[in-house]
Image (spheres, rainbow, N blue to C red):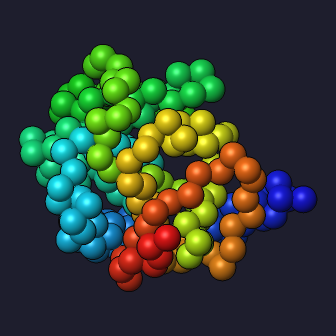
Amino acid sequence: MNYSKKQDLRKIISERKKQLTENRSIALSKKIFFQLESLSAFQSAKVILLYHSLKDEVRTHDFIEKWKEEKTILLPIVDGDNLKLKIYKNSSDLMIGAYGIEEPNGSIFSDYEKIDLAIVPGISFDAQGNRLGRGKGYYDRLLPDVKAYKIGICFAFQVSEEIPTEPHDSKMDLIITEDGVISEI
């Protein structure tokens, strides 16, 4: 039953994303990161788990470039059924990985205890901190090992009243959209 509800929600959000122009996506992403940068959790973080965005996600590329010298930025790579983390150095260090996502090609980062902040993408989030991903379970397998403060970022139209959850789903500590903080759990 939850699977069907999740699939329906993914379709609804996908249709909403199609209405978003590239310029609007970039502008809204800047507002989201402005909100994020004002948080003490971000300001004090030294090691940050982020993601290299796809075109239909909150745009992280400029944000990564802005902070790569001041903070250690970790990006996930797809390795079979799991995500592994690598340190981002610069854009010339990227190569196309699974699902067309650009991934760093450096060495694996495995000291998860050193991660201060995790900034997580999602198809949708709710005010209780629940997250709906793309359905492959990559973040569901990664996030239990990451004890850092977790922030879900998305566009305001991606916030849902309620996300169907499973016992293995990881909750976010905070959700941020271009309109501000949605929830601090």
Spot occupied by residue 56 in the image (x, y as percentages of width and height): 49, 57
User: On screen, 165 above or below 102?
Assistant: below
User: Quick check: can you spot residue 71?
Assistant: yes
Residue at the (43%, 44%) spot, across then down:
147
Horizontal relation, residue 75 to residue 78: left or right: left
In the rendered image, the quadrant that contains the N terminus is bottom right
Vertical side of 139 occupied by 105: above or below: above
Q: Is residue 92 left or right of residue 184?
A: left
Please, which residue is most extreme toward the right here?
A: 1
Residue 136 falls in image quadrant: top right
Q: Residue at x 9, y 41 (%)?
A: 69
Along the viewing direction, whichever of 83 and 99 lies nearer the viewer? 83
Q: Where is 48 relative to 3, above or below?
A: above
Q: Where in the figure is residue 146, as x and y percent of width and height?
A: 44, 40
Q: Position of residue 31 (x, y in %)?
A: 28, 74
Front residue (pair 98, 146): 146
User: Which residue in the rendered view is the most extreme toward the top?
Assistant: 107
Q: How many marks?
A: 0
Locate residue 113: give its quadrant. Answer: top left
Report the front residue among 66 and 98.
66
- Which residue appears farthest toward the bottom when viewing the image? 179
Q: Is residue 160 left or right of residue 62?
A: right
